[in-house]
Image (cartoon, rainbow, N blue to C red):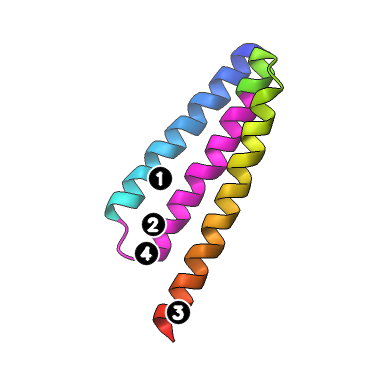
Amino acid sequence: MTIYLYAIATLLLLSILAGLIRVLRGPRPAERMMAAQLFGTAAVAILLILSRIMDSPALLDVAVVFALLAAVTLVAFVVLASRKVS
């Protein structure tokens, strides 16, 4: 079971790498923000997997904080983007 969790974590890290390419090359800010949201989602998933592997409930708390920060960041981006359009 642990090998599968490590494989999933590796695939999540590869998705972060793909998102990094989009952040660097993305033509529009919205695409860059969506790639940043991918970072947040993948980080939460990796923390949940590591919590399971290491049997550490503290990592669950860190994952919740990351998820909340990702949501707040997205809301802040939308607010700022809507102010620039108006």
Residue 16 percent coordinates (x, y): 43, 38
> Which one is earlier in the sequence, the residue at label 3 or at label 4?
4
Name which residue type carries label 4.
Pro
Q: CA distance from mark 3 to mark 4?
A: 14 Å
Q: CA distance from mark 3 to mark 2?
A: 18 Å
* As drawn, 33 above or below 59: below
| Comparing labels 3 and 2, the label whose residue is closer to the camera | 3
Is residue 36 shown in magenta?
Answer: yes
* As drawn, 73 above or below 48: below
Look at mark 3 in the image and give the residue it sits on: 83
| Comparing labels 3 and 4, the label whose residue is closer to the camera | 3
Cβ atoms at labels 4 and 2 below 8 Å apart: yes
> Which one is earlier in the sequence, the residue at label 1 or at label 2?
1
* As drawn, 74 above or below 52: below
Look at mark 2 in the image and give the residue it sits on: 32
Name which residue type carries label 2.
Arg
> Which one is earlier in the sequence, the residue at label 4 or at label 1?
1
Residue 43 percent coordinates (x, y): 53, 36
